[in-house]
């Protein structure tokens, strides 16, 4: 039986998407689990807007405690912001949970001041409670409300009430510039902990017989609250929305973050799929990945699956510290197994095409005066690999031609792959794996006249513009 991971990896290759981890759970049992080394299922990973769903869970717990009501006006909990526009004054917690607030877009991107304040100061465009608009600043307001009312950070509140009881740890939210947790986009956690939280939601808020989340709130969170069919995003997202959670056209619910971070739960089939990735190289890649998963991969895999999943071996493998199946049977060297005994392949990094016939040795330094491009580039390349670096830009990309190579880029962990794709043409690809996910693609073309032409593209919300290069370099004086 072909695994869901293998089917999804096949689709990801066609989209030029880097899959980082995949886990599949059926009826509470982990049947597949794989990670792209050096990442593991326990590696902290930026989850971006998946944090919106977790923020909603915190709001639901406070509502269940009686600390707030979903019908409460937002300004009733942020009194220092009044007076405000009448449409802001009437906006409720429920309006923000359902993305039917008074703003046409995220406000802090259009305001020179504190993020929380921006939501109350940017002029609204509509009556709240009417039309769906994806507004991350509204989620930021919700996370600030949680922290004010709980008297602790969003992560600490979730840890005490939800994460600790299910064995999840190391969860954090990046802070906004005014100190509140970025509940709408700043979640950092492991893939395994995302799966654990998503499983509680799939189980209606119950874990080991104990209600950790209010069942009624979970039911409302995963039920249609807002119509999203006017959106221009991927077809699966043009259906409906619950509480900070998408409800795809093919059914189930979806925690979804930029770059392909997702947890999709299908209560009907008792199926949970958790993916981390970086889709930013592919235009609309995260939406295309969701469409591929729900419209192609899941139907194919589910139709061909075994009727039962004897999962003990797979679960031991998926629960191993590496996520690569430390306790797996010796006849399963590549990854974990699914319940039918089929090997789950380890995930691999996207790599440039490599034709060894074009490999050559290159050593030297080149310079350019093209505005915006690094002033210099140095190559030290041999038959097996080497380095490309820039003293001016302050970066070094080491690479091996035979396998991915770890590096440090923009102060973060990174993985570099490379290949000679044609005569004198060296291609590199770099995956940046810090709190800000990013990817870089470089093509370096050496010509017989000694010139070096470089085209580089960077993909990431906060990646330095220095990675956007289109320039020809000349040999530096004294360079070999």
Image (spheres, rainbow, N blue to C red):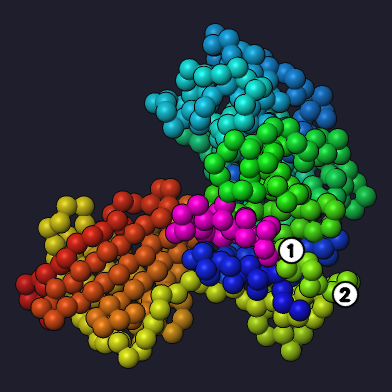
User: What is the number of the mark on residue 310?
Assistant: 2
Picture layout, residue 255 above or below residue 140: below
The reply to whether residue 40 is visible in this rendering is: no
Q: Nearer the viewer, residue 266 or 35?
A: 266
Q: What's drawn in magenta, residue-wise? A: 274-297
Q: In the figure, is residue 58 to the left or right of 449?
A: right
- Residue drawn at x 63%, y 45% is 237
Q: Report the residue at 37% width, 79% height from top.
A: 419
Q: Position of residue 87 (x, y in %)?
A: 59, 14
The relative height of residue 87 versus residue 208 in the rendered view (above or below) is: above
Relative image position of residue 274 (x, y in whole percent): 69, 59
Question: Any magenta on residue 171?
Answer: no
Q: Position of residue 13 (x, y in %)?
A: 53, 70
Q: Secondary structure at mark 1?
A: helix
Give the residue at mark 1: 299
Which residue appears at 89% of the width and 72% of the height? 308
Residue 213 pos. (x, y %):
82, 40
Of 145 and 259, nearer the camera is: 259
């Amino acid at each position: 039986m072909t695994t869901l991971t293998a089917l999804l990896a096949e689709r990801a290759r066609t989209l030029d998407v880097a899959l980082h981890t995949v886990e599949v759970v059926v009826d509470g049992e982990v049947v597949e689990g794989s990670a792209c080394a050096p990442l593991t299922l326990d590696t902290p990973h930026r989850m971006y807007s998946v944090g919106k769903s977790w923020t909603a869970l915190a709001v639901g717990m406070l509502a269940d405690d009686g600390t707030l009501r979903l019908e409460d006006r937002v300004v009733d909990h942020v009194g220092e912001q009044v007076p405000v526009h009448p449409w802001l004054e009437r906006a409720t917690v429920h309006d923000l949970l359902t993305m039917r607030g008074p703003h046409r877009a995220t406000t802090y991107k259009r305001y020179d001041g504190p993020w929380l304040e921006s939501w109350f100061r940017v002029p609204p465009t509509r009556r709240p409670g009417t039309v769906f608009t994806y507004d991350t600043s509204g989620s930021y307001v919700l996370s600030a409300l949680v922290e004010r009312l709980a008297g602790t950070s969003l992560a600490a509140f979730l840890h005490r009430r939800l994460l600790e009881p299910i064995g999840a740890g190391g969860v954090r939210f990046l802070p906004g510039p005014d100190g509140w947790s970025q509940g709408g986009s700043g979640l950092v956690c492991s893939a395994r902990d995302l799966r654990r939280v998503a499983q509680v939601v799939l189980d209606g808020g119950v874990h080991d017989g104990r209600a950790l989340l209010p069942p009624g709130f979970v039911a409302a969170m995963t039920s249609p609250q807002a119509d999203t069919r006017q959106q221009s995003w991927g077809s699966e997202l043009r259906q409906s929305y619950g509480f900070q959670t998408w409800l795809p056209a093919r059914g189930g619910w979806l925690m979804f973050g930029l770059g392909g971070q997702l947890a999709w739960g299908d209560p009907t089939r008792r199926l949970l799929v958790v993916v981390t990735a970086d889709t930013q190289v592919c235009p609309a890649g995260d939406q295309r990945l969701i469409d591929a998963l729900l419209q192609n991969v899941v139907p194919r895999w589910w139709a061909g699956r075994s009727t039962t999943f004897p999962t003990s071996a797979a679960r031991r493998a998926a629960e191993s510290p590496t996520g690569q199946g430390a306790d797996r049977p010796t006849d399963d060297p590549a990854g974990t197994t699914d319940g039918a005994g089929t090997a789950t392949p380890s995930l691999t990094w996207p790599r440039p095409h490599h034709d060894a016939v074009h490999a050559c040795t290159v050593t030297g330094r080149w310079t350019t005066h093209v505005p915006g491009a690094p002033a210099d580039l140095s190559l030290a390349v041999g038959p097996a690999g080497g380095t490309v670096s820039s003293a001016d830009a302050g970066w070094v990309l080491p690479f091996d031609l035979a396998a991915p190579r770890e590096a440090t880029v923009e102060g973060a962990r990174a993985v570099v792959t490379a290949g000679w794709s044609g005569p004198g043409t060296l291609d590199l690809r770099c995956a940046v794996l810090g709190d800000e996910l990013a990817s870089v693609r470089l093509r370096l073309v050496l010509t017989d006249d000694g010139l070096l032409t470089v085209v580089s593209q960077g993909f990431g919300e906060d990646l330095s513009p220095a990675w956007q290069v289109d320039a020809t370099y000349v040999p530096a004086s004294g360079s070999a």
